[in-house]
Image (cartoon, rainbow, N blue to C red):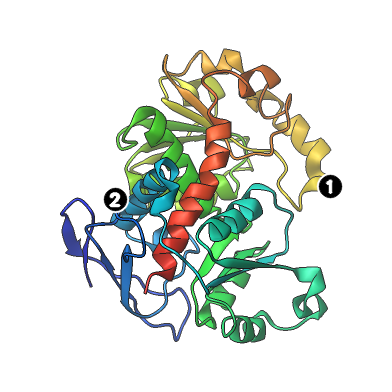
């Protein structure tokens, strides 16, 4: 497959589905991707179905193009390509605020429709195999965003889907969040390539997407977790040139330009909260810890935040905290992602 991005670069890459029986997709990036408006095509697919289950599903050039497009759409919402007569299905097994609102608002602003399906209100909640749900739902909608626990459920759905499938969060990865984080950094500081990012806290789904992002966007990532709460060893090993594990929070943050954290107990781990709070007590991101970072360092958190636990209340509201821009950018990056996946 030959691709060309909006900056005149070209090369060879391929995108294949994760499951057996899936077909290869060829993607061509139109040079007008950043600035065009109206109903002009921004992305075009020659054949196949593109999914977004992890950042690794798309070439780095396309990920950067999506971020650039999101910045353009934020500055000029009228540039968005109309998705009239297209429907996004949202299948959520976990609670959501930012992700759901961002997807529904994005589709509404592009004249499309969204259909929210809570698992408990569908046949999935009564035991229908997810493969059968995929076969049916993908005949009725144009794209599906799934928020679930087991990442394998996403892969199984995608393997039987006729339309693009987006990971709206799984226990293993949260790629949509990383698109927003990259956009937020670029808005405030410019290119992210070459900087040092410090992750403090649980080696959870967002942390693991940061590992993928370090490779895709070419930055150094230091991960600081209590022993036993690290991200998957194979992910760290696969990105060993850019990712390192550091035990002391101050050492991890030293000189970093971006400091990131997340809740200590993710959805589904509520029963572990008390134990996790004890284990993670020395891993709070606060003003004292940020003093070890670069003088112009930024702080990010995907939210919701537990003030006084993983982040101090005062830090969350400081000028070097860009969490509110980060949250808003979920809508802009997801709008650009939908344009990309729904392109004809």
Residue 107 is left or right of residue 10, and the answer is right
- In the rendered structure, which disc, 2 or 1, sits on the residue that comes first in sequence? 2
> Closest to the observer: 292 or 6?
6
**Category of crowding for the residue at label 1, using alpha-carbon neighbours closer than 10 angstroms: few (below 14), some (14–19), many (at least 20):** few
Q: Is residue 120 found left or right of 140 in the rendered image?
A: right
Instruction: Give above or below for 131 relative to 303.
Output: below
Q: Position of residue 116 (x, y in %)?
A: 69, 66
Q: Which percent across, then down, holds residue 284?
A: 65, 25
Q: Residue 35 — which label? A: 2
Residue at image x 39%, y 33%? 187
Disc 2 residue crowd, few under 14, some 14–19, many 20+, Cα 10 Å: some
Question: What's the mark number on residue 271?
Answer: 1
Q: Which x, y percent locates residue 228?
A: 64, 43
Question: Relative to 177, does residue 317 appear above or below in the rendering?
Answer: above
Left or right of 117, for residue 262:
left
Quarter of the image with the N terminus in it: bottom left
The residue closer to the viewer here, 216 or 332, is 332
Residue 26: which quarter of the image?
Answer: bottom left
Whether label 2 touches label 1, CB < 8 Å:
no
Q: Nearer the viewer, residue 264 or 25?
A: 25
Could you tell me if residue 244 is visible in this image? Answer: no
- Regarding mark 1 in the picture, which secondary structure is present there? helix
Question: Which residue is painted at 63% across and 43% down in the image?
Answer: 229
Q: Quadrant of the C terminus?
A: bottom left
Eyeballing the image, is 259 above or below 233?
above
In-image side of 137 versus 73 (left or right): right
Numbered mark located on residue 250 in the image: none
User: In what element is the residue under mark 2?
Assistant: loop
Q: Using the rendered view, name the quadrant where residue 140 is placed.
A: bottom right
Residue drawn at x 59%, y 14% as measured from the top left: 287
């Amino acid at each position: 497959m030959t691709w060309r991005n909006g900056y005149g670069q070209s090369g060879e890459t391929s995108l294949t589905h994760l499951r057996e029986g899936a077909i290869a997709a060829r993607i061509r990036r139109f040079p007008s991707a950043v600035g065009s408006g109206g109903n002009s095509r921004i992305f075009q697919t020659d054949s196949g179905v593109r999914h977004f289950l992890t950042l690794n599903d798309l070439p780095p050039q396309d990920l950067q193009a999506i971020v650039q497009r999101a910045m353009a759409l934020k500055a000029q919402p009228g540039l968005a390509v109309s998705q009239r007569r297209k429907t996004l299905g949202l299948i959520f097994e976990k609670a959501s605020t930012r992700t759901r609102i961002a997807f529904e608002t994005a589709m509404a602003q592009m004249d499309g429709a969204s259909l929210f399906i809570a698992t408990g209100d569908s046949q999935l909640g009564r035991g229908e195999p997810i493969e059968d749900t995929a076969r049916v739902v993908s005949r009725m909608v144009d794209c599906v965003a799934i928020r679930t626990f087991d990442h394998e459920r996403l892969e199984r759905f995608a393997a039987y889907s006729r339309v693009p499938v987006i990971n709206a969060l799984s226990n293993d990865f949260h790629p949509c969040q990383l698109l927003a984080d990259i956009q937020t950094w670029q808005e405030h500081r410019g290119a992210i390539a070459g900087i040092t990012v410090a992750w403090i806290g649980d080696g959870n789904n967002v942390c693991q997407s940061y590992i993928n992002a370090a490779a895709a966007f070419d930055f150094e990532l230091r991960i600081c977790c209590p022993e036993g709460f690290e991200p998957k060893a194979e992910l760290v090993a696969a990105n060993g040139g850019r990712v390192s594990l550091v035990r002391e929070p101050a050492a991890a943050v030293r000189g970093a330009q971006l400091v990131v954290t997340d809740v200590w107990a993710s959805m589904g781990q509520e029963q572990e909260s008390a134990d996790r709070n004890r284990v993670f007590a020395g891993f709070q991101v606060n003003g004292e810890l940020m003093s070890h970072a670069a003088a112009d360092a930024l702080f990010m958190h995907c939210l919701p935040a537990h003030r006084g636990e993983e982040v101090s209340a005062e830090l969350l509201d400081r000028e070097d905290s860009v969490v509110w821009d980060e949250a808003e950018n979920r809508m802009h990056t997801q709008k650009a992602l939908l344009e990309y996946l729904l392109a004809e």
